Image: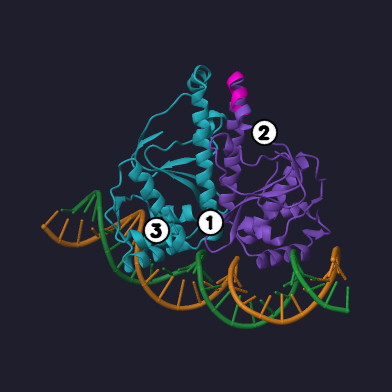
Chain colours: A cyan, B purple, C green, D orange
DNA sequence: CGCGCGGTTGAAGAACCTCAATTCGGGTGG
DNA sequence: CCACCCGAATTGAGGTTCTTCAACCGCGCG
């Protein structure tokens, strides 16, 4: 479990490009599948300096015997992880670059706020454009262009490793995220 | 759990288009998340006549108390489901239409063979091109074109609701699936 | 026979990519 | 303190992939 810093789970395709499966921020769990299968399926790369805490799978299984509710918690984590992945699948399948980027940023902001790492309209942002591109199924060049368009239309800007949302309304609008 | 026939799990996007999250064939489980959350998150649509068997979640939880290994089985199902979803994410993010379609068909063939529904080089194929398009993040028109190109290059053909793989080597090659 | 659904085909355009040159910014050594 | 350097971001031009729109075909069914 990541305690501080950012990381990315990713896979390679034969031509050498990467697909980032998920960005990990503090509180997120890497390699939950280790609870079931003893092999690491997906490489995890630290994107900043990080600190984390590791668990011994054997211990967890033992605790699971004493307290079955823990296992149900695992199930919960796992299903919500799948839910996130499926949401990303919809993004890659049916949304254009602008929407993908807006949703990506809105999602990160929501998750960071939940942990008190972001404030209402800004957050730390250590991601390279290449990493974002690998997450959204785009090229770094195109991410740059969309970022520029967001900057020019005063939706958001990135300065010195920090992202400022200047027009949350517009961002959520592009992202097609509707609050009630 | 689907016993016979085909189904699809999908979501809508605001503009009315769909994204198919997964195709279900006999042996697959729809709505595994119900074990955790009482609400249905993802609609499931039958694509053919189907038969299935339903489970009572309350019963399952009860059994889970008596036999904790059942809960671990759920975890297994859930992680492998996520693994599949992430594989599709890589397809949509980093592969072109030809590769996506080849991998889609190769995957279906593998799963159907596992259940004895397909033979070595052919399988039932009740899917509309629109459904395939919704699964692969393409348009029906483009699926038609890629299918035609496969037909013309003698990789596969579809006749009367059945798909025939005429050149498995070529199919797996396009799909970048390497057996050893 | 006609109707409707699914698939095919063509032409034109949009979205995104590739290649390549240039700029920016932060860190390092003189 | 400044000049340089390197990785990352920006910008431009041109190309490819996929989409959109629309017409047409084929086939099963009432």
For mark 3, what is the residue? A172
Is B62 one of the magenta-colored residues?
yes
Dot 3 and dot 1 residues touching (CB under 8 Å): no
For mark 1, what is the residue? A92
Q: Tell me the number on the disc at residue B55.
A: 2
Q: Chain of mark 1?
A: A
| Residue A38 screen position, x and y as percent | 56, 29
Say which of B176 and A150 sits in front: A150
| Residue A139 screen position, x and y as percent | 47, 60
Q: Chain of mark 3?
A: A
**Residue at image coords 39%, 49%:** A108
Going from N to C along the chain, the mark reached first, 3 or 1, is 1
Seen from this angle, which residue lies furthest top? A66
The magenta-colored residue range is B60-66
Say which of A51 and A178 sits in front: A178
- Of the residues tagged 3 and 1, which is closer to the observer? 3
Label 3 to label 1: alpha-carbon separation: 18 Å
Q: Tell me the number on the disc at residue B120.
A: none
Label 1 to label 2: alpha-carbon separation: 33 Å
- Are the residues under marks 2 and 3 on the same chain? no
**Residue at image coords 63%, 55%:** B135
Label 2 sits on a secondary structure element that is loop
Magenta span: predominant SS is: helix
Label 1 sits on a secondary structure element that is helix
Label 3 sits on a secondary structure element that is helix
Dot 1 and dot 2 residues touching (CB under 8 Å): no
- Are the residues under marks 3 and 1 on the same chain? yes
């Amino acid at each position: 479990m990541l305690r501080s810093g950012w990381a990315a789970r990713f896979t390679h395709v034969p031509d050498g490009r990467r697909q980032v499966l998920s960005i990990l921020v503090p509180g997120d769990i890497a390699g939950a599948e280790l609870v079931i299968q003893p092999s690491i399926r997906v490489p995890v790369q630290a994107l900043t300096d990080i600190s984390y805490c590791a668990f011994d799978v054997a211990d967890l299984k033992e605790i699971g015997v004493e307290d079955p509710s823990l296992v149900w918690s695992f199930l919960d984590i796992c299903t919500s992880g799948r839910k996130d992945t499926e949401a990303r699948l919809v993004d890659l399948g049916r949304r254009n670059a602008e929407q993908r980027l807006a949703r990506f940023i809105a999602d990160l902001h929501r998750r960071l706020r939940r942990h008190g790492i972001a404030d209402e309209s800004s957050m730390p942002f250590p991601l390279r454009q290449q990493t974002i591109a690998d997450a959204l199924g785009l090229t770094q060049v195109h991410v740059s262009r969309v970022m520029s368009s967001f900057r020019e239309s005063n939706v958001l800007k990135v300065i010195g490793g920090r992202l400022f949302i200047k027009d949350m309304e517009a961002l959520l609008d592009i992202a097609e995220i509707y609050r009630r």
